[in-house]
Image (cartoon, rainbow, N blue to C red):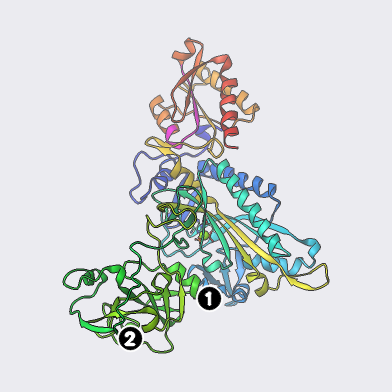
Amino acid sequence: MYWTQTFIPTLKETPADAEIVSHQLLLRAGLVRKLTGGLYTFLPMGLRALRKIEQIIREEMNGAGGIEVLMPALQPAEIWKQSGRYETAADVLYKVRDRARKEWVLGPTHEEVITTLAANEINSYRQLPRIFYQIQTKFRDEIRPRFGLMRAKEFIMKDAYSFDTIDAGAMASYRRMYDAYTRIFRRCGLQAFPVEADTGVIGGNYSHEFMVPAETGENDVVYCESGRYAANIEKATSRGASPSTPTAGTGASPATFPTPGVLTIDALAAAPHSVPAHAQIKTLVYVLDSKPALILIRGDDALNEAKLLAKTGATQARPATGDEIVTTLGAHPGSLGAVHKVPEDVSVYADELLRGARGMTTGANTDGFHLQHVEMDRDIRVSHWGDFRTVRAGELCVETGQPLKIRRAIEVGHVFKLGTKYSEKLNSTFLAEDGSRQTTVMGCYGIGVTRTLQAVIEQCHDKDGISWPLSVAPHQVCLTPLNVTPESQPRQVAEKLRAELLAAGIDVILDDRDERPGVKFKDSELVGFPLRVNVGEKSLAKGEVELKPRGGSMQPAKIEEAAAQIIAFVRAGMAALG
Ligand SMILES: Nc1ncnc2c1ncn2[C@@H]1O[C@H](COP(=O)(O)OP(=O)(O)O)[C@@H](O)[C@H]1O
Ligand SMILES: [Mg+2]
């Protein structure tokens, strides 16, 4: 490739609307251009890096027994109604109608399509297990598309689906995909680690996300430094909070006391009342799939909505409005509680940390009053106990007892064990060896390919630009003659090197622009080629060219040894990535 024959529109200025560095560099290095929020055109350098990531994924998927297919992006609404997700995933679905007013969906994922395929094509245990995968465009009506490719409306995903005869088989398929993911991210030069994950709207019962640590990530990961525990905060648990919940009561009955103007946990914790937050019960009113419910957590805790959805099985949860709260409990936020006046048909969910709590204080469901001497078991009708709280840094690890830490991370991949949720609804069954008809056991496995590309940039850059791992760089080597006229010695040496490197299978770009060296150097650092080779008259006079690894220091190389040294550099670097 020659620089003048491709299209690399680098920018000197940082684009104003790009908030995070990887998004800025995508634009500045000329990898992508925005069409409108959440929609991007890939330019040649971005596309080359993308194709390399796809190729790594393909090789590892094939190596793990995956079978590549390609499914339609446009999907009939019927199969989404059949799975139930036409409603439950409605907020991300792009729904479209055709000329006959028939309903369609632009696929945000492909469980429905692949399970329909399996229902039609797989009929015998002899055809199982199978893992199908594709690399394909997805559409999601994201509430907040942002950070470039990180959260887009249209993006490329690798999605794989496994079908097994029994649960243990599904577990083995899951493990195969999990291990392949570990290899994929390592080969992309990305430090990604698996964490236990919530299953969300996909459903299923077992899941891990692959996370890339980054301050700009949208996830919080709770982890133990021992390496023995890591979980998305949506799922994470701990050995509890400190100080522990009071359990020694006075035996006295709940007593009302006036708390005019006290509307928050903090206000009640302050003088004159001075009730510590961990001795208060926080009462939250939520609407779960249109039904009001109370959620009780300790005063110093925060509700975890993902856990609430997972534990209640609701598909949607939102805080009740002021009016809904007054209708349900007869009081305003600030004075809410679950002791008196809770209608019988309202479910009360209580966090495990409140089990056995005594001597607690909570709202009286009368504005301006609270209740003290509350005992959970005696005074509150709890319909369901569960873990509804958000873990905080410093709490103790369930595995090791060491203090947990929390850090931000980018989710690049997600593996789920689905069980029979989709195969039941979409009739994927098979004839078992004993002649009985059984339901296939499924798993699904996604990698955000375009997000992975940006995560590499987020992790691999410096003040001068991107610093690509050799495996995914748009080109591995940038040959930079400092005189580009065809008869000049720098150009001729560069051309000869180019031919030798191409013959050795090295991916080279030759910067044949008639530009000042400074401009060429800056651009190649910005685009981030792993190795630049400067070919200038001065060093040629000494019989040398200059090798400049990205982020490393310049080394001279004898002209006649240069090709061999460059090839060795690339091969060693690639081998190190596995
Ligand atoms: N809006 C998006 N833009 C870019 N990549 C996405 C987007 N949504 C999901 N992905 C990628 O696809 C992978 C699989 O998606 P999934 O786990 O179903 O999504 P989510 O975690 O958003 O529910 C994610 O791990 C992520 O890498
Ligand atoms: Mg996910």
Magenta span includes 471: no
**Residue drawn at (22%, 72%) of the image:** 268
Q: Quadrant of the N terminus?
A: top right
Looking at the picture, how far across and down is residue 248, in whole percent? 33, 73
Give the camera-side residue of 526 and 209.
209
Quarter of the image where the C terminus is located: top right
Q: How many marks?
A: 2
Describe residue 155's horizontal placement relative to residue 11 as left or right. Answer: right
* Position above or below: 227 against 124: above
Identify the residue shown where x is 54% and y is 22%. 494
Mark 2 highlights which residue? 329
Say what amino acid the circle numbered 2 marks. Leu
300, 82: nearer the viewer: 300
Within the magenta stretch, is there residue 529? yes
Label 2 residue SS: helix
- Tell me the SS state at disc 1: helix
Q: Are marks 1 and 2 in contact (CB under 8 Å)?
A: no
Residue beneath the point at 64% across and 70% down:
422
The residue wearing badge 1 is: 87
Magenta stretch bounds: 525-536
Tell me if residue 155 comes above or below residue 379 in the rendering.
above
Quadrant of the image occupied by residue 108: bottom right
x then y, percent, for residue 428 = 71, 70
Binning the other alpha carbons within 10 Å of mark 2 as few (below 14), some (14 to 19) or many (20 upward) gives: many
- Disc 1 packing (10 Å; few <14; some 14–19; many ≥20): few
| Ligand 1 within 8 Å of the CB at mark 2 | no
Residue 314, position in %: x, y?
49, 76
